[in-house]
Image (cartoon, helix red, strand yellow):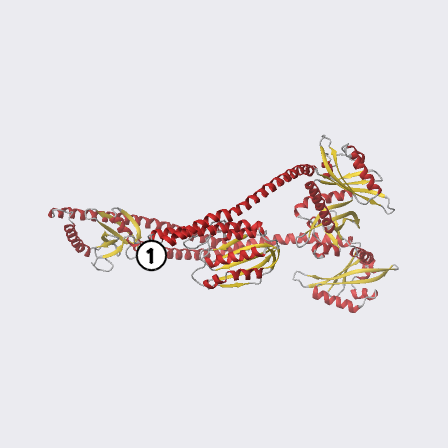
């Protein structure tokens, strides 16, 4: 170990020397490289600035031979002349190392033109690079009029150090550059050489150091080892002497363990006093003899002894029991044979250890019998049973119901702390309860929770007892799953809450009168109806009678008396009560008498409801009903008068209005017949207008009469076949359908309750409307009917011109037309007449249509 430590220190020292040498060399090279880089920067800047000033001086000198340097043509010639001279000079340029060069360029639009011959390809042909290219960064700075030095990519894509300077007189830039690789190469080479030389020097020095220090190191190590070995030997001797004393004392003091030591031949070398007692032999008699002799004297099978010795040599230990008769009683000895080993782990003898376990075996047999009875009792229990250490809270035992309750195996339960059966957030609370339980010896706990293996929480009730089991205090806990009971209690609580809420909403309370004790129980809402705080006082039957209104008390007492005498029908009465604040309210009471097995009145239960609002509304409704009856009578008289006026109007329209109209029509026809030859074309046209107006007026009067007669002259409702009504309408429209070349289809139609004539009128108007407003393509009309809830829904569908959705309601208004008379004739009353007829039947009519896509008219007739 010391040798390894010294070698480690030597290697560490060499590594430190190598790191120091390399660090010094690296720092030196870095300083030299930075110095060289700075010198190159200064050199490039001085060269590019001196060349730029020289070119400017030449340009100013040659400008004396030109009259206008701003002239572009002269300027171009002048620039070419200067460039020719620069090219000749640049051909001979050898400075700036192997990669250094001068570049001259100017901007031309979005490009930079380079003029001088490039040192790397030996050509004088100008070449172009995009102005924004990353390869033209130095020249871009120069032509933009900026002076300085940058490190970047040149036109070859190589990293260079470049100094740039503008030549403003010629509007060009000059760049002097050199590759960074050329600047770094000598330093990289020098670093490699320095590293190699340093490594060789350190390696040679290390070998020399190892060779010189080797003998000295061996001497140091040997000295250290000798000192350590001498010290260990002294300590071992002292420990051995101490252990020998301890062992002798232990072996002599073991009064219940027999110890026998032998060599490999089983010759006894040691025989303690307990062995003398167990085997009834003295040590002087057996030392020097073999163990086989003792076993033969005690009736032990010698074959079993040989097997045990073989097992010890193989496994290092062998256990067996010896039954011996000692002083007239059977003695059971638990024996072990162990092999004794030397420092090299080789056996040098055997150690026989025997202990009297007679009492333990008998106690174990009794305990096993007791445990069987206990287990039978515990496993037959219907509740989960846990046994926990009272001092530590660790679960020691549990039954099968506990496994079922927790959904865990017994091996998973035993060893848990009892608080781990419960939710972690309640662990502190449960721990405190368990300590109180130990203190007060016994307690029943409710509203507890346990957690099953799947995380589900189960409500339980615990009955626990602290008792002694042998020399150990334990907690015996009986856990009962109360999930079903909790669900019932929860359902009952929810039901009671719902009942209380419903009673509060309905202002309905309940009461229960015990006729034997005169005790009367009221619900919370019943207290509120009586004007008292819930459960604030005891309200007896006498108390209730005292708060009755004096006018209603006799009625209530008589109703109760009748109910007690004859329980059928149940007690029911409306009356008033007076609250403590003096307010009088109306209540409605119902009650039922409960009889016992002997048919004797036992209890009287019932309800009480605040009906003050209803009574108030009843009084208001009575007044409103009377007012409504008066209004109905007045409206009836007005309606009769209106119907009479309508009859007079119909008579006037049919006789008084049409008579002058016929007179006008007759004289106009005579005028046309006798004087048509004397009238010019315009006069004849005027007469035609008058005749047409008279005809239209006559048609309007007829339509108006039909509209007015819907209610008065309609027939009574009867069972009508909608099929027959549709057939009649189709016969009336037969000629129009033929001329329009229309196709009319139908679904089966039902028999309904209606005015047959008016139903025919509806079909006729809707079919005529579809024929009138047909499109250019062939007309198809389809009639159908379906049953929805309590009404029939008829539909008449066509593929005509359709209706704009914004006019869907307007078309059912009398005299409302969407088209001029020149396009479609008519009075505009047909759909209004349909609407009036449908409303007379208790239905409604509407249309669904899109312009250009046809229309579907729907109307309903109640069943």
59 to the left or right of 344? left
Q: Residue at x 68, y 61 (%)?
A: 342
Q: Position of residue 358 (x, y in %)?
A: 82, 58
Residue pointed to by mark 1:
189
Relative to 174, say whether 269 is above or below: below
In this rendering, is residue 134 above or below 535?
Answer: below
Q: Residue drawn at (78%, 68%), measured in percent from left and top?
A: 304
Q: Residue furthest front?
A: 674
The answer to whether 622 is drawn above or below residue 93 in the figure is above
Front residue of 364 and 255:
364
Residue 392 seen in the current view: no
Q: Quadrant of residue 612?
A: top right
Question: Seen in the image, is 531 located left or right of residue 62?
Answer: right
Residue 48, position in %: x, y?
Answer: 23, 49
Is residue 139 at all visible to an observer of this figure? yes
Residue 652 pos. (x, y %): 51, 46
* Quadrant in the picture for residue 785: bottom right
Q: Residue 306's spot in the image, x, y percent?
A: 76, 68
Q: Residues within 10 Å of mark 1 (few under 14, many from 20)?
A: few
Q: Nearer the viewer, residue 47 or 837?
A: 837
């Amino acid at each position: 170990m010391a040798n390894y430590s010294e070698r480690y220190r030597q290697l560490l020292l060499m590594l430190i020397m190598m790191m120091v040498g390399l660090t010094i060399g690296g720092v030196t090279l870095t300083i030299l490289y930075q110095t060289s880089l700075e010198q190159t920067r200064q050199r490039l800047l001085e060269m590019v600035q001196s060349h730029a000033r020289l070119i400017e001086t030449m340009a100013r000198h040659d400008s004396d031979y030109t009259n206008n340097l701003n002239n572009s043509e002269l300027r171009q010639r002048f620039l070419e002349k200067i460039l020719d001279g620069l090219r000749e000079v640049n051909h001979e340029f050898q400075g700036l190392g192997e990669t250094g060069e001068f570049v001259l360029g100017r901007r031309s639009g979005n490009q930079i033109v380079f003029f001088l011959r490039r040192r790397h390809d030996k050509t004088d042909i100008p070449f172009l690079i995009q102005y924004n290219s990353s390869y033209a960064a130095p020249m871009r700075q120069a032509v933009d009029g900026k002076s300085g030095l940058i490190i970047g990519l040149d036109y070859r894509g190589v990293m260079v150090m470049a100094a740039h300077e503008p030549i403003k007189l010629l509007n060009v830039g000059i760049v002097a550059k050199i590759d960074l690789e050329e600047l770094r190469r000598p330093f990289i080479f020098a670093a490699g050489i320095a590293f190699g030389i340093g490594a060789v020097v350190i390696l040679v020095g290390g070998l020399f150091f190892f060779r010189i220090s080797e003998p000295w190191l061996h001497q140091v190590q040997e000295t250290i080892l000798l000192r350590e070995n001498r010290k260990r030997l002294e300590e071992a001797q002292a420990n051995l002497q101490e252990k020998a004393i301890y062992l002798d004392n232990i072996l002599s003091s073991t009064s219940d363990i027999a110890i026998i030591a032998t060599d490999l031949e089983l010759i006894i070398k040691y025989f303690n006093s307990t062995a003398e007692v167990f085997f009834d032999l003295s040590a002087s008699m057996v030392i020097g003899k073999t163990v086989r002799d003792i076993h033969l004297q005690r009736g032990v099978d010698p074959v079993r002894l040989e097997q045990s010795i073989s097992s010890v040599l193989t496994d290092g230990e062998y256990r067996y029991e010896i039954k011996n008769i000692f002083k007239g009683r059977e003695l059971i000895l638990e024996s072990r044979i162990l092999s004794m080993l030397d420092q090299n782990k080789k056996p040098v003898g055997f150690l026989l250890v025997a202990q009297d376990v007679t009492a333990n075996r008998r106690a174990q047999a009794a305990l096993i019998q007791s445990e069987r009875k206990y287990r039978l009792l515990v496993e037959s229990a219907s509740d989960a049973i846990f046994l926990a250490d009272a001092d530590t809270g660790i679960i020691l035992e549990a039954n099968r119901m506990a496994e079922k309750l927790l959904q865990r195996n017994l091996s998973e339960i035993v060893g848990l702390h009892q608080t781990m059966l419960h939710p972690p957030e309640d662990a502190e609370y449960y721990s405190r309860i368990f300590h109180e339980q130990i203190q007060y010896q016994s307690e029943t706990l409710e509203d507890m929770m346990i957690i099953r293996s799947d995380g589900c929480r189960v409500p339980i009730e615990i009955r626990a007892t602290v008792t002694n089991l042998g020399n150990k205090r334990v907690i015996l806990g009986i856990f009962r799953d109360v999930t079903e009971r909790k669900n019932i209690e929860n359902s009952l609580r929810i039901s009671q809450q719902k009942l209380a809420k419903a009673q509060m909403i309905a202002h309905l309370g309940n009461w229960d009168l015990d006729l034997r004790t005169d005790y009367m129980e009221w619900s919370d809402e019943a207290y509120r109806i009586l004007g008292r705080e819930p459960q604030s006082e005891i309200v007896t039957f006498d108390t209730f009678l005292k708060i009755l209104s004096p006018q209603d008390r006799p009625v209530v007492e008589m109703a109760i008396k009748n109910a007690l005498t004859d329980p059928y029908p149940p007690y029911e009465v409306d009356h008033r009560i007076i609250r403590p604040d003096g307010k009088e309210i109306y209540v409605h009471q119902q009650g039922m008498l409960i009889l016992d097995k002997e048919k004797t009145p036992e209890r009287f239960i019932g309800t009480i409801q605040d009906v003050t609002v209803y009574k108030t509304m009843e009084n208001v409704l009575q007044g409103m009903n009377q007012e409504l009856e008066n209004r109905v009578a007045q409206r009836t008289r007005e309606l009769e008068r209106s119907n009479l006026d309508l009859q007079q109007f119909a008579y006037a329209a049919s006789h008084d209005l049409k008579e002058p109209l016929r007179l006008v029509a007759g004289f106009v026809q005579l005028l046309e017949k006798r004087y048509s030859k004397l009238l010019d074309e315009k006069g004849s046209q005027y007469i035609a207008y008058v005749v047409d107006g008279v005809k239209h007026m006559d048609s309007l009067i007829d339509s108006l009469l039909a509209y007015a007669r819907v209610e008065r002259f309609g027939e009574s409702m009867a069972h009508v076949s909608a099929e027959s009504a549709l057939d009649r309408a189709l016969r009336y429209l037969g000629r129009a359908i033929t001329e329009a070349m229309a196709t009319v289809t139908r679904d089966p139609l039902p028999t309904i309750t209606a005015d047959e004539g008016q139903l025919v009128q509806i079909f006729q108007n809707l079919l005529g409307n579809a024929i009138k407003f047909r499109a250019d393509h062939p007309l198809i009309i389809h009639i159908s009917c379906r049953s929805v809830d309590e009404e029939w829904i008829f539909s008449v569908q066509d593929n005509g011109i359709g209706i704009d959705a914004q006019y869907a309601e307007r078309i059912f208004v009398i005299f409302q037309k969407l088209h001029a008379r020149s396009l479609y004739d008519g009075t505009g009353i047909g759909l209004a007449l349909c609407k009036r007829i449908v409303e007379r039947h208790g239905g409604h009519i509407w249309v669904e249509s899109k312009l250009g896509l046809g229309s579907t008219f729907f109307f309903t007739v109640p069943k």
